[in-house]
Image: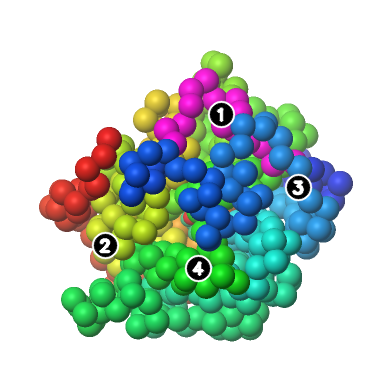
Amino acid sequence: MENLKILLSEKDIPHSWYNLSADLPFRLPPPINPATKKPLEKKDLSAIFPDVLIEQEVSQKKWIEIPAQIRDIYRLWRPTPLRRARRLERFLKTKARIYYKDESVSPTGSHKTNTAVAQAYYNKKAGIKRLATETGAGQWGAALSFACNVFSLGCRVYMVKVSFHQKPFRKSLMHMWGSEVIASPSSLTESGRRILKEDPHCQGSLGIAISEAVEDAARNKDTNYSLGSVLNHVLLHQTVIGLELKKQLRIAGEKPDYLIACVGGGSNFGGIALPFIKEKIKNDKLQIIAVEPSACPSLTKGKYCYDFGDTAMLTPLLKMFTLGHNFIPAGIHAGGLRYHGCSPLVSALASKEIIQSRAYHQIEVFKAAVIFAQTEGIVPAPETAHAIKAAIDIAKNDNKEKCIVLNFSGHGFLDLSSYDKFLSGELKNYAHPLKAIKNALKDLPKFS
Ligand SMILES: *Cc1c(COP(=O)(O)O)cnc(C)c1O
């Protein structure tokens, strides 16, 4: 009988994060300072990030040691299990072997705590008193709240207004860990006030909430900004996922044919995929697949160019696949995947066709989620269900003895109201808004 769980012990928690930049055969296009149109300098970021994280953002060191205090917190839930989805395989009648790396066992139920703990630690060490951040569906806000509580830091979360009202329970989690949660756009910042003047009923977007949090951090000396995805240092912290996975696959005697993860800003995808990229570049039949919603299709329908990370154009310009910083995606239920851009590192890999991408509509994604819950027993987050949908499709189409591994980025226990809507037939597909994309792409900054 094959093992359903491949478990590691605490001593297998990685001692270093893996920095792919050091191993890439090409240089990543640098972030650009929008005022000077020159590559960003480290000092440009020091108003909002601690030096260590800025250093990690641009580092060319291959291995970056994980401080003992961070590993000690990781021990609360790491190493995470690698599970074999045997009952799903049987249901699909596939010869493929499907595994999932289960990041849902973290305190807040997603992979985001891997970087939240690291970011809170470095800010605390730098003498910062408070972090400001944004959150969409609330996964990041909850993860950073947990981490700030661990290190006795204050935390203010600008939460996209539509989720603030529709998803009250992640707000409860943030409050439990002592954070202040503000519905964004708010009247606390200039960016928020400007948006509200134009549209008092604006339901918000991640791009707007980022503007508010960045502004808050830039204006307050004791406050820094923290981002839950997109940036190199965030993906770096997430590589614990892929590093553990490599050990687990070795124990299972497996070599993956497919690695699959959903993509919002790219952090859980980066976490599982980056440690495999070097092998992939060398040869390999390994296919690495990023999955996104058709309603917010940055990798599959966006443009690879420099754009702002936020709506108010406060952030540096990043070269990435983008739908335009003014793109406000439809209110789909995978809130964590509603970002106009994508990590520059993941975007570069996609532009060089080292990785592939595909998009799905939300109803087929929810169907896949229910199949997974009925066979494996865990309710996936709607974001995670995108990766599950792709894995199911591949297992059906490539019905050979292939090894498929997906990143189970989080559980959906706080998304049950979305599942209720799906089960009662209220959920709709959003046709991908080509016109909206075209319009938002008109506002790209004049820089290339
Ligand atoms: C936030 C989130 C995502 C998307 O963010 P990435 O940075 O692309 O990983 C995916 N899954 C879950 C469960 C999330 O909370």
Q: Residue 313 — which label?
A: none
Residue that appears at 26% across and 75% down: 194
On screen, residue 363 versus residue 72, left or right, reads: left
Q: Nearer the viewer, mark 2 or mark 4?
A: 4
Q: Sequence-wise, which precedes: disc 1 or disc 4?
A: 4
Residue 266 point in image, percent of width and height: 47, 47
Q: Which residue is mark 4?
A: 217
Q: Residues within 10 Å of mark 2 (few under 14, many from 20)?
A: many
Q: Are marks 4 and 3 in contact (CB under 8 Å)?
A: no
Alpha carbon distance from label 3 to label 1: 21 Å
Magenta run includes residue 140: no
Magenta run includes residue 25: yes
Q: Which residue is mark 2?
A: 328
Residue 319 point in image, percent of width and height: 37, 39
Q: Sequence-wise, which precedes: disc 4 or disc 3?
A: 3
On screen, residue 328 versus residue 141, left or right, reads: left
Q: Nearer the viewer, mark 2 or mark 3?
A: 3
Q: Sequence-wise, which precedes: disc 2 or disc 4?
A: 4
* Residue stretch in magenta: 16-30
| Camera-side residue of 184 and 31 | 31
Q: Residues within 10 Å of mark 4 (few under 14, many from 20)?
A: many
Q: Residue 277 — which label?
A: 1
Residue type at mark 3 is Ile
Alpha carbon distance from label 2 to label 4: 24 Å
